[in-house]
Amino acid sequence: MNLGNTTAHELAAMYRNHETTVTQVIEAAFDGIEDRDADIGAFLHTRRADALAEAGRTDASFARSEEMPPLTGIPVAIKDNMNLRGMRTTCGSKILEDYVPTFTSTAVERLLRAGAIVLGKTNMDEFAMGSSTENSAFHPTRNPHSRDRVPGGSSGGSAASVAAGMAVLALGSDTGGSIRQPAAFSGVVGMKPTYGRVSRYGLVAFASSLDQIGPFSKTVRESAELLETISGFDPLDSTSAKMDRPDWVASLDKPIEGLRVGVPREYFVDGVDRQVQSKVEAGVARLEELGCRIEDVSLPHTSYAVATYYLIATAEASSNLARYDGVRYGYRASGGPSLRDMYRQTRKDGFGKEVKRRILLGTYALSAGYYDAYYLKAQKVRTLILDDFRKAFGQVDVIVTPTTPTTAFKLDEKVDDPLSMYLSDIFTITCNLAGLPGISVPCGTSSEGLPVGMQLIGNHFREDTILSAAHQFEMAGGFKS
């Protein structure tokens, strides 16, 4: 069985019709990982024995014609910054190389309750800090469409696992574009929900006011199904929103004629690859053909977003990563004449170059004498960016932009140029700063055969609007625009 051509919806129908078994599907998934992942490097750890045992129990339930949860038997990969009890959570870092959590994250727990079968943990930029999945302490991940190019980051392993047909669905985390950017580079659907929509309990924190968990899939319908499964209030997460979980799948087919679609001039500027801009403009034209009203909007503080993000995110990272000291869990350096020396050597050896860079930036921004000049000012600009979106959503229902300014770049092309790497997320970080939902969908390929992504941004807690627009776009052939 080729899982690369099979959706979760199709698999569910095959199970109901007894055309295949869960055990056969899970075996096919691991065969695919064995055949292809040595070349791609999407996974860090797999759980074949446990997954096959779960598959066997699921097949027995099917044989008894029991009522089954919505994602029963669907093979799913999860990013290695989400806890699964008894399985290592490394965050792509040497400092957590041997950490085995004693609890499961809420999002993963909800997946398991819905019947999904976790294949394993996927590779990522260390502590989710990166845009290429080259910052992993273990190995880089390669783009399934072109092995000499990156899959995006930091959730590159999850994106690649779906794009290569090794997993049917995957979970990633998005702090500044870490779901949407790799989705665009890898030619799959990737969605960041509204901040607070999905519990962060059990997600290892990078920047707590920005992090969100979301789905990867081949189709919009699958992302809606997966997002429905993991969403909802969680008392274990103080930032979780007390809101009912909508039926997004049921709303996918509602007409989008008359939908007001905003196109911000600040996202179509010099520096955007000509082919990317052309494909996204064709995508906007396709939405117009579907009856949407296209309107110009302005988000005037967009030019400050990168600087704002890299002050706030690094400041929060500096605070969150202070806990990795070699005492409570994770790697501990041996030797040293004092406790302070052990702390220093542990963090020196355990963290990679990019993580150290961001800790230094964040610590500086929070230090005495600089807090007001940098971190506090960044928070004020964050409010201005949010106000831009509030005004725009007074005019329109959805905002459409390129997901990324370029297609996937080559491995090693930007590793020594941090600023260039940071600019890969220039069109996605505003969503996180404002706490808005956003989805990246494919909208064709470049002349080199590399995927191009189009981003749809919605107002707070209006995932239904962008999912419906993205689904209608997909059904109208927009993925191949």
Image: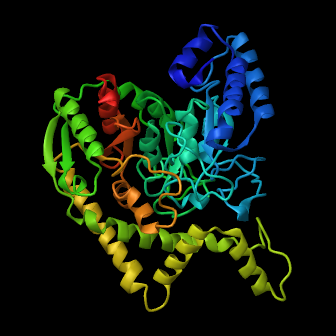
Question: Viewed as shown, does residue 461 lie left or right of 344?
Answer: left
Q: Residue 238 location in percent, x, y?
A: 53, 59
Residue sitting farthest toward the bottom: 369
Name which residue lies at 46% across and 81% down. Answer: 365
Colouring mode (rainbow / by chain / secondary structure / one colour): rainbow
Does residue 476 sit above or below 372 in this rendering?
Answer: above
Q: Residue 169 location in percent, x, y?
A: 55, 33
Q: Quadrant of the N terminus?
A: top right
Does residue 183 sit above or below 343 in this rendering?
Answer: above
Q: Is residue 481 visible?
A: yes
Q: Residue 236 location in percent, x, y?
A: 60, 54
Q: Quadrant of the C terminus?
A: top left
Question: Viewed as shown, does residue 182 lie left or right of 28?
Answer: left
Q: Nearer the viewer, residue 63 or 441?
A: 441
Does residue 355 sit above or below 245 in this rendering?
Answer: below
Does residue 230 sit above or below 96 in this rendering?
Answer: above
Q: Residue 310 location in percent, x, y?
A: 43, 69
Q: Is residue 243 visible?
A: no
Which picture quadrant has residue 398? top left
Question: Viewed as shown, does residue 446 lie left or right of 370?
Answer: left
Name which residue lies at 26% across and 40% down. Answer: 280
Q: Nearer the viewer, residue 148 or 192?
A: 148
Name which residue lies at 32% across and 38% down. Answer: 466
Q: Nearer the viewer, residue 235 or 154?
A: 154
In this rendering, the count of numbered labels is 0
Which picture quadrant has residue 433? bottom left
